[in-house]
Image (cartoon, rainbow, N blue to C red):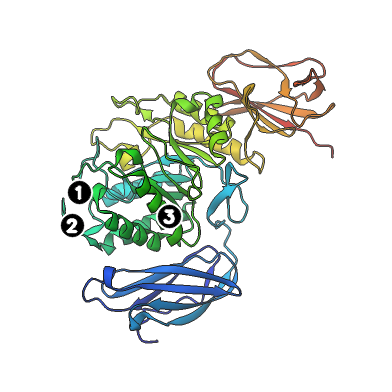
C-alpha cells in the first residue's frame, strides 16, 4: 500500500456513483483552516476539479461523481506536501438499473434524470428527521420506502420550533451546546451521519433537497446568525462533502427572508454553491413573505411557499410565465389538525392542490402536521404518516408516470385552466371542487385536426379509480377556438368533486 493512502482506492465505479479517495495528512492545528485539498479528474479533454475536505483524525477525503463512462485519471492538489500529487486512475462502468443519474431541468419547466428518464416530482417535507433519536430516523426511512414521495426537503441544521424543541444527538460544529461553538471546526461525526442518511435516501430512489439555512433557531444555537466568513466556510464544507451524491438538491434556505441576512448575502451564497459544486446540482431558495429574484442564472428552479396559488391552476401557471423555469410549490400548507392556519388542511384539500398544480404544469410538495402525544409530527420529525393524502398522491404519481415524456403543459391557459397535457395527444381535465354530472366533449384547438380519435377514462382522484369508456370520440371543428365530438356526445360523470378525465389519442396501427 502506498504511504498515506487509506485502503485501496476503487479501480472501478459506476456512472453517477461516488468515487472516494482517502489520504492521511496533518492533524495538528486546525486542518479545517490550515490545509487546502482538492483533486483534478481527467478524461480526454474534460477536467473536473472537486474540493476535498477534512474528515477528522488526520483523514482527508475527496469525492467525485463521474458523469461519463470510461477511464478517468486524477491527481491531488494540496497546500501540504503529504496530500499533494497523489495520482491514480479508475474505470467508470455503465450504471445499474436503479441509477438514472442526477435530476436536471428538462424542457424549461420540468425535470428529468441525466439519462433522460422523466422525473415526476411528488415531494414531502421532513425538516428535522435526521436530528431525532436513531429509532425514529429508521422508522422515517421505512415510511418513506413505502410512500409515493421521491423528494424530501430536509435541513442540515437542527430546528427549534413549535412541536420541535428537543436537542439533537449531534451538532455540526465542535463546542458545547447550546451556544459555545467554534464555527471554524466542523464535527465530522455529524456530517458522516448526514451523508449516511442522504445515501440511504438515494438507495430508496429519493432526492434529498438539502436546506442549508433556516430561521428556526432564534439564537438558541446561533447557527442562524454566523458571520459571513463562517457562512461561506460552512457552505463550502457541506458542498464538498455532499456534491458527489447524485440525489442531492441544494435549497439555500427555508423562509430565507425571515433570516438576518441581506439579499446580497444570498446572491453570494448561491454563487459559492454553484462554484463549489462541479456537477451543477439543482439550486433553489424558499420564501416566507418576500420572493427572491428567481431570474438569477444561479437559480435552477423556483421553490415557493404559496398555498392559495394552487387552489386554482390559473394562478399557479402565472409563475411559469414570470420565471421560465420549473415551478415547485414546496409549501402549499399541510394536511393536519394543529391550531395554525398553515397546518390544518384536510386531506381532500391537499390532494386538490396537487392536482391544480399538475394541470398548471407545475409541481407541489406534501407535508403533514397531525398532533401527536409525543409531538412527533411528520413535517418536522418524521416517523409514520397518519393522513389520507399519501395514497391519493401515489395515484397521482401513477398517472404522471404514464403521461407524455415532455411533461404536463397548459393547453389553453387563459381560457381553459382545467386542462393540461400535450396538445393533440394527451389531456388531463380536472374538475376540482365542481360536481358535474356530464362534460360536453370539447377540447382547445391547439394540435387538433379533423377526424382525430380519442379514448376517455374517468379518474376519481379521491377513490383512486380509473373507469374507461368503451366508445371512442372523434373530433370535429366547432369554431375557431374549439373542437368537439363529431356526434355531439358528452362524457357522463358521477356528480362528485375531485373527478378528472384522461383523454388519449388513438394512433392508427
Residue 116 point in image, percent of width and height: 63, 53
Residue 352 in view (yes/no): yes
Quarter of the image that includes the C terminus: top right
Residue 368 point in image, percent of width and height: 37, 34
**Residue appearing at x 58%, y 58% in the figure:** 97
Mark 3: secondary structure = helix
Whole-angstrom CA distance, mark 3 to mark 1, is 26 Å
Q: Which residue is mark 2?
A: 181
Mark 1: secondary structure = loop
Of residues 435 and 244, the one nearer the viewer is: 244
Whole-angstrom CA distance, mark 3 to mark 2, is 26 Å
Quarter of the image that includes the N terminus: bottom left
Query: In the visual, does 452 lie left or right of 11?
Result: right
Mark 2: secondary structure = strand
Question: In the image, is residue 141 above or below residue 360?
Answer: below
Q: Which residue is mark 1?
A: 221
**Residue appearing at x 30%, y 38% in the figure:** 258
Q: Which residue is mark 3?
A: 271
- Work out whether mark 2 precedes mark 1 in sequence or the reverse, and give the earlier one: 2
Query: In the visual, does 98 lie left or right of 241?
Result: right
Question: In the image, is residue 489 above or below residue 75?
Answer: above
Amino acid at each position: 500500500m502506498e504511504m498515506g493512502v487509506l485502503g485501496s482506492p476503487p479501480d472501478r465505479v459506476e456512472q453517477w456513483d461516488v468515487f472516494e479517495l482517502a489520504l492521511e495528512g496533518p492533524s495538528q492545528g486546525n486542518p479545517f483552516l490550515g490545509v487546502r485539498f482538492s483533486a483534478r479528474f481527467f478524461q480526454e479533454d474534460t477536467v473536473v476539479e472537486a474540493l476535498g475536505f477534512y474528515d477528522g483524525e488526520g483523514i482527508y477525503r475527496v469525492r467525485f461523481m463521474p458523469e461519463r463512462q470510461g477511464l478517468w485519471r486524477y491527481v491531488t492538489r494540496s497546500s501540504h506536501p503529504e496530500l499533494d500529487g497523489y495520482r491514480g486512475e479508475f474505470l467508470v462502468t455503465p450504471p445499474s438499473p436503479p441509477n438514472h443519474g442526477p435530476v436536471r431541468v428538462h424542457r424549461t419547466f420540468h425535470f428529468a434524470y441525466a439519462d433522460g428518464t422523466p422525473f415526476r416530482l411528488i415531494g414531502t417535507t421532513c425538516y428535522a428527521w435526521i436530528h431525532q433519536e436513531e429509532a425514529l430516523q429508521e422508522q422515517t426511512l421505512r415510511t418513506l420506502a413505502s410512500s409515493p414521495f421521491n423528494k424530501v426537503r430536509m435541513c442540515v441544521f437542527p430546528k427549534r420550533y413549535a412541536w420541535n424543541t428537543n436537542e439533537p444527538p449531534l451538532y455540526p460544529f465542535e463546542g458545547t451546546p447550546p451556544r459555545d461553538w467554534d464555527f471554524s471546526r466542523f464535527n465530522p461525526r455529524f456530517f458522516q451521519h448526514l451523508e449516511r442518511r442522504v445515501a440511504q435516501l438515494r438507495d430508496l430512489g429519493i432526492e434529498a433537497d438539502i436546506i442549508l439555512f433556516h430561521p428556526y433557531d432564534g439564537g438558541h444555537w446561533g447557527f442562524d446568525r454566523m458571520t459571513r466568513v463562517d457562512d461561506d466556510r460552512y457552505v463550502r464544507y457541506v458542498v464538498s462533502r455532499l456534491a458527489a451524491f447524485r440525489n442531492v438538491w441544494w435549497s439555500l434556505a427555508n423562509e430565507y427572508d425571515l433570516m438576518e441576512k441581506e439579499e446580497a448575502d444570498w446572491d453570494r451564497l448561491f454563487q459559492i454553491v454553484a462554484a463549489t459544486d462541479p456537477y451543477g446540482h439543482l439550486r433553489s431558495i424558499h420564501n416566507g413573505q418576500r420572493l427572491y429574484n428567481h431570474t438569477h442564472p444561479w437559480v435552477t428552479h423556483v421553490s415557493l411557499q404559496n398555498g392559495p396559488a394552487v387552489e386554482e391552476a390559473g394562478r399557479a401557471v402565472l409563475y411559469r410565465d414570470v420565471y421560465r423555469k420549473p415551478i415547485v410549490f414546496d409549501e402549499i400548507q399541510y394536511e393536519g389538525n394543529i391550531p395554525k392556519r398553515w397546518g390544518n388542511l384536510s386531506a381532500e384539500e391537499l390532494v386538490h392542490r396537487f392536482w391544480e398544480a399538475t394541470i398548471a404544469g407545475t409541481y407541489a410538495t406534501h407535508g403533514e402536521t397531525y398532533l401527536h402525544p409525543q409531538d412527533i409530527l411528520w413535517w418536522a420529525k418524521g416517523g409514520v404518516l397518519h393522513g389520507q393524502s399519501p395514497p391519493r398522491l401515489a395515484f397521482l404519481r401513477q398517472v404522471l408516470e404514464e403521461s407524455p415524456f415532455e411533461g404536463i403543459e397548459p393547453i389553453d391557459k387563459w381560457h381553459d385552466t382545467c386542462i393540461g397535457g400535450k396538445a393533440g395527444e394527451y389531456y388531463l381535465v380536472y374538475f376540482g371542487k365542481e360536481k358535474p354530472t356530464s362534460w360536453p366533449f370539447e377540447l382547445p384547438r391547439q394540435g387538433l385536426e379533423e377526424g382525430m380519435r380519442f379514448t376517455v377514462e374517468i379518474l376519481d382522484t379521491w377513490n383512486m379509480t380509473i373507469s374507461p369508456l368503451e366508445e371512442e370520440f372523434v373530433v370535429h371543428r366547432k369554431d375557431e377556438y374549439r373542437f368537439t365530438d363529431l356526434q355531439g356526445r358528452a362524457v357522463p360523470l358521477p356528480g362528485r368533486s375531485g373527478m378528472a378525465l384522461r383523454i388519449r389519442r388513438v394512433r392508427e396501427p
